[in-house]
Amino acid sequence: MLSVEQAREKILALAPVMEAEDTPLLDALGLVLAEDVVSPLDIPHWDNSAMDGYAVRAEDVRSAGSRSPVVIRVIGRLAAGQVATQVVQTGTAIRIMTGAPMPLGADAVVPFEDTDELARKATNGSLGEIGILVAPSRGNNVRPRGEDVAKGVVALPKGIVLRPGELGVLASLGYATVKAVRRPVVAIIATGDELTTPGGPLGEGKIYDSNSFSIAGLVKRYGGVPRVLGVARDNQASLYTLLEEGLSADMLITSAGVSKGDYDIVKDVLAERGEIAFWSVRMRPARPLAFGTLRGQGGRRIPHLGLPGNPVSAMVAFEELGRPAILKMLGRTRLDKPTIEAVLEDTIVNHDGRRVYARAVVTRRGDAYYVRTTGPQGSNILTSMAQANGLAICPEDMPQVGPGQRVQVRMLDWDEEGERS
Ligand code: AMP
Ligand code: MG
């Protein structure tokens, strides 16, 4: 039987990284940068004022103090977006706003509060001149050209994940689009004669198809583009029809039809269209799995992950085996789910030497994390997945873990307090 890690290796080996494409900035949030971004300009583009105040020559006002103001002539005003037409000559100043380019001649900005401007206003005094109350050093309150990014340097390196801050940097360099690794399109097919699409009436003996939605939700959450193709019946013709649609995607995920009872249809159809392996993976839930590649258009090989039908099994198998594949296709290199160590408050039993993933709730008390399971762990009990914020692990080689023992927990929803987010 394959270990989870062995199964994951095999899947990752067949999951291709998607190509890079020019992407509008906002659509690139969460995507991987496909090439170094070299700055075409200095940011800031010119020396500019960091404060609202007066642009002066530091040398002129060297002797300024609160009791010995140096009064100089104000020759103009400058707002952000304006460029000075005058030069600040000895004994003069320009009233300047934050972000405005420094006028020629000036080398420091004295903020309003270090001048007698307020007092002048209060007494209707002349603003044609200003008293400087604090002597600035050269460069005070001046943001030098290129301070943030110098022209020609790598502002953002290839391979990083584009977060809001990176989008801001790209925008500040003037880019409207960015070369990013595109999202994989993931086709999702549910299989089973018993399945009904939600929204319609439920016939006798039927159930609603939940896997299409939980799996599509996971695909979307981790950065893929889910394409829900609907339900294939347990016959070859039905599966073929949906499969045709799925072959234009970058990855195919099916659910059900891989357990002992009835997997032959899925197996036959998929094997005919590519190379499919059926595995037993040493995990609980989700032992039976299919994985392989299908022949798509132009001989393209499309990874296919055949998840088990039970709703919890499908989700847990996806978290451990599908999620890393999607992240790799997105060009990510960190594929591991955030995992913490927590003190177990009840018991997880391991009957048969598999790795057990128990749905669990993690809470933080003081400096430690505590975890308890969500109750009945049947792989059909989907509400236990909805209640959980983590999957607590009992390792393969332990018959059980009990109260007070430390266990690893894969965090499904992660915030610092360990609360459900
Ligand atoms: P199977 O793998 O076909 O033997 O299915 C195992 C169990 O999962 C059965 O109880 C199915 O009814 C259930 N199941 C299969 N597919 C779905 C689905 N898409 N949504 C909800 N339950 C499903
Ligand atoms: Mg079935």
Image (tube, grey):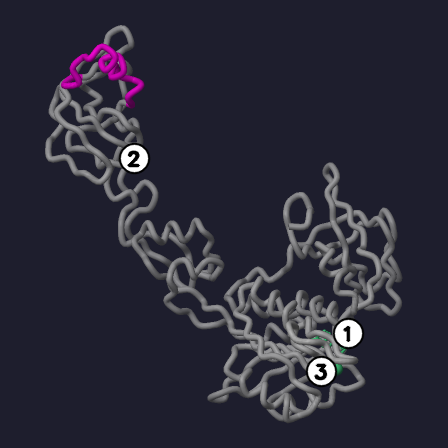
The residue where tag 3 is placed is 192
Q: Give the residue at x 25% y 12%.
A: 122
Instruction: Residue 148: name its quadrant.
Output: top left
Q: Which residue is identified by label 2?
A: 143
Which quadrant is the N terminus positioned in?
bottom right
Does residue 418 lie above or below 226 as drawn?
above
Q: Work out whether mark 3 precedes mark 2 in sequence or the reverse, and give the earlier one.
A: 2
Say which amino acid is labelled 2.
Arg
The image quadrant that residue 193 belongs to is: bottom right
Identify which residue, 99 or 212, lies in the foreground. Answer: 212
Where does ligand 2 appear, by image quarter? bottom right
Can residue 332 be seen from the camera position used here?
Answer: yes
Numbered marks: total: 3
User: What range is drawn magenta here?
Assistant: 111-129
Q: Secondary structure at mark 2?
A: strand
Residue at 68% x, 84% y is 277
Q: Secondary structure at mark 1?
A: loop
x, y percentage for residue 94? 17, 26
Against 306, is 360 above or below? Answer: above
The one nearer the camera, 152 or 296, is 296
Residue that carries the numbered disc 1 in the rendered image: 287
Q: CA distance from mark 3 to mark 2?
A: 66 Å
Where is residue 316 drawn, in percent x and y? Answer: 71, 66
> Who's the residue at 87% across and 55% down the image?
347
Query: Is residue 114 located in the magenta-colored stretch of the structure?
Result: yes
Whether residue 258 is visible to the viewer of this picture, yes or no, is no
State how far apart marks 2 and 1 are (Cα). 61 Å
